[in-house]
Image (cartoon, grey):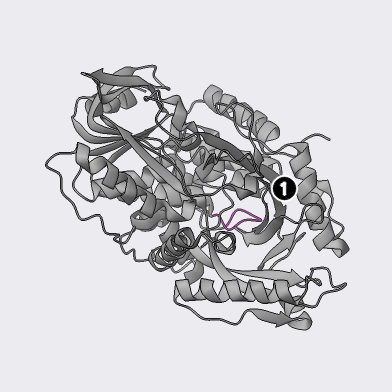
Amino acid sequence: MRARAEEIGALAGREWDVLVIGGGITGAGILLEAARRGLRAMLVEQRDFAWGTSSRSSKLVHGGLRYLAEGQLRLTRESVREREALLREAPGLVEPQGFAFADHGGGWPRRLGFLAVLRIYDRLAGRREPHWETADGFAMLAPNVRREGLLGGVRYTDAKTDDARLVLRVLDEARAHGAEALNYVAVQGMLREGGRIVGARLLDERSGQEQAVRARVVVNASGAWAGALGGEGKGPRLRPLRGSHLVLPSWRLPLAQAVSLLHPGDRRPVFAFPWEGATLVGTTDVDHSEGLHLEARITRHEFDYLMTALRAAFPQLGLQDGDVLATYAGVRPVIDSGQHGAPSKERREHMVWSEPGLVSVTGGKLTTFRAIALDTLRHAAPQLPGWQADLAPVPVFARVTPPLCRALPGSVLRRLGGRYGRHAQALVDAAGEGELETVPGTETLWAELRWAARAERARTLADLLLRRTRLGILLPQGGAAHLARIKTICQPELGWDEARWLAEQAGYMALWRECYGIPAA
């Protein structure tokens, strides 16, 4: 605690060019792009890094096929460009994911229209691949899909990621360029001089220490929480939308491809795809009316909605509520069009607006975080006299050589290189006996827990199990059966005494039951 207070005091005593508020993917991207262009940049997050939307997304790095079908060509072009860049730059973290869409008699006009959209999608990505499969060929791609009335199907390629690890990797890249990032530091209010914002008053949630930090420009990148920082009210009206998901064991819903299907009730698209050794199902798109200070959670209605889609698509599997390992929900910062239409019809572009000393940004997609960051810096540039920089896109990540370890296969080394970047070799070298084995039922190494506890600023057990690793949503009951071994690995690294560990364990399990378990009927 004392070291933490000293760290914050030292940082507060420095003059910053940019103070970024918000530790999700948007804030992390802005921090990186600012730091690599010579700005003295610092980020603060009131909870944990990626605590909000950026650890609770659908885990897809996609070009936005739906946006293209709705005529949003600019957004799709930008998304496809960013997806392809991340696939090149972050192997092991951003990976290709095939999608399959069954045709149970939608009619030739609809089928031809879908194929035409996919041809444009391919052209934007600079690739070309076959898209139509016969019924037998489609059944090979998705063997458990409903065969009755199956005429064939469409397939295409997008990408997937671990969203929380993506945020952490971007933050680490920013630190390599001299930036600073602190979690559990809340903004108490803005510093103002002569009608201009010149910094912020910060509160360290752990020590209770308050500090004033000065910056030439404050960037509000707090997403769905953007309206809570008290600017002059010039920003757009937000429509917080909740997306909820299910996680099932891969043996219970085995998939080689992602399967897109239309919900039998309202014909909305729902997907299921293999992720981190499990199968992820989503997503809903409903207005979120609960307070944003509360942890988002799935409702029973949303749970039943997704289970209905699965049972209709895979009737022979006989899926039951008890087959679900975990649930999670996140709130998207969508800009309200004012049309009062269906949530899924709201546009997903980002918006940036400014006032003296403050630049705010919200909206947008996980995939386009680099483009959002560069656009935000363009708006900030007039408030940074003397700073000139080329804001053309450059690779997000430095080239990384996968770690060396004869005990691990190449696919695992590639995964570690993607998720941990320049620290992957140190993670492998720090592993204790048996820690280069995977946690049963997942693709996570036990050694990842040790490294997270030692070097990744985890402050709570939830940080370790829900964001540094994803064991909390990949294992039954949030990993309760493995807590004894997790304690053996992590407690010495964290420096927690027995009372602290027991308190953390009790708090984590209560949180898991309330927000990540199966909601009561």
Q: Residue 504's quadrant in the figure?
A: top right
The residue that appears at 39% across and 16% down in the rendered structure is 208
Q: Can residue 146 be seen in this view?
A: yes
**Relative image position of residue 94 (x, y in whole percent):** 48, 62
Q: Tell me: 388 left or right of 493.
A: left
Residue toward you, 379 or 203: 379
> Helix, strand or loop at disc 1?
loop
Task: Tell me the quadrant of the picture where the N terminus can be found.
Answer: top left
Q: Tell me: 245 left or right of 395.
A: right
**Relative image position of residue 191 (x, y in whole percent):** 28, 20
Residue toward you, 66 or 259: 66
Q: Mark 1 points at which residue?
A: 325
**Relative image position of residue 165 (x, y in whole percent):** 47, 50
Specify whether residue 27 is painted magenta: no
Q: How crowded is mark 1: few (under 14 residues within 10 Å), some or many (20 or more)?
A: many
Residue numbers of the magenta segment: 438-444
Up-down relation of residue 83 to residue 44 (above or below): below
Q: Total marks drawn? A: 1
Pick out the residue farthest to the left. 386
Q: Tell me: 416 left or right of 100.
A: left
The residue that appears at 60% across and 53% down in the rendered structure is 439
Magenta stretch: helix, strand or loop mostly? loop
The residue that appears at 31% across and 48% down in the rendered structure is 32
The residue that appears at 74% across and 77% down in the rendered structure is 108
Residue toward you, 445 or 192: 192
**Relative image position of residue 297 (x, y in whole percent):** 66, 36
Q: Can residue 174 be seen in this view?
A: no
Task: Tell me the quadrant of the picture where the C terminus can be found.
Answer: top right
